[in-house]
Image: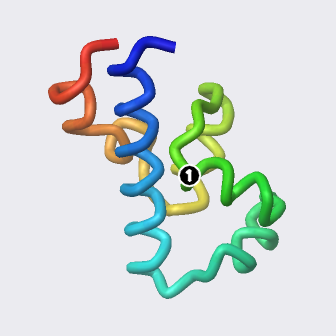
């Protein structure tokens, strides 16, 4: 994976964690939204994931995929 892609997913994982915490959710709370805890940890750790997962994450966080990734692509060229 290109370094910029790794940096993109790391930053996206941090953003997802921050948003989740702003809602007062724990990682375990994401189970009720269709994720298992290990998968959610994988996402927040900044490992790459596929587009369908992006849609599931954004829906769980009550936002669009565009809102979730807005601004990240300016810092990292994919």
**Residue 19 lies in what quarter of the image?**
bottom left
Residue 9 location in percent, x, y? 45, 36
Residue 59 location in percent, x, y? 57, 53
Residue beneath the point at 71% across and 79% down: 29
69 sits left or right of 37 in the view: left
77 sits left or right of 64 in the view: left
54 sits left or right of 75 in the view: right
**Nearest to the observer: residue 36 or residue 23:** 36
Crowd tier of the residue under label 1, counting other residues whose Cα lies within 10 Å: few below 14, some 14–19, many 20 or above = some
Give above or below for 5 relative to 71: above
Task: Return the residue at label 1.
Answer: 45
Residue beneath the point at 67% across and 59% down: 41
Give above or below for 58 relative to 66: below
**Residue 11 lies in what quarter of the image?**
top left
Residue beneath the point at 67% across and 50% down: 42
Residue 76 location in percent, x, y? 25, 23
Task: Provide the secondary structure element on which disc 1 rests.
Answer: loop
Give above or below for 16 relative to 37: above
Residue 31 location in percent, x, y? 80, 69
Residue beneath the point at 49% across and 87% down: 24
The C terminus - image quarter: top left
């Amino acid at each position: 994976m290109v370094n910029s892609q790794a940096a993109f997913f790391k930053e996206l994982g941090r953003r997802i964690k921050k948003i989740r915490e702003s809602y007062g959710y724990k990682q375990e709370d994401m189970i009720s939204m269709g994720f298992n805890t290990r998968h959610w940890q994988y996402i927040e750790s900044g490992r790459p994931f596929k587009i369908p997962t992006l849609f599931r994450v954004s829906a769980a966080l009550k936002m669009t995929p565009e809102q979730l990734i807005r601004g990240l692509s300016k810092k990292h060229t994919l």
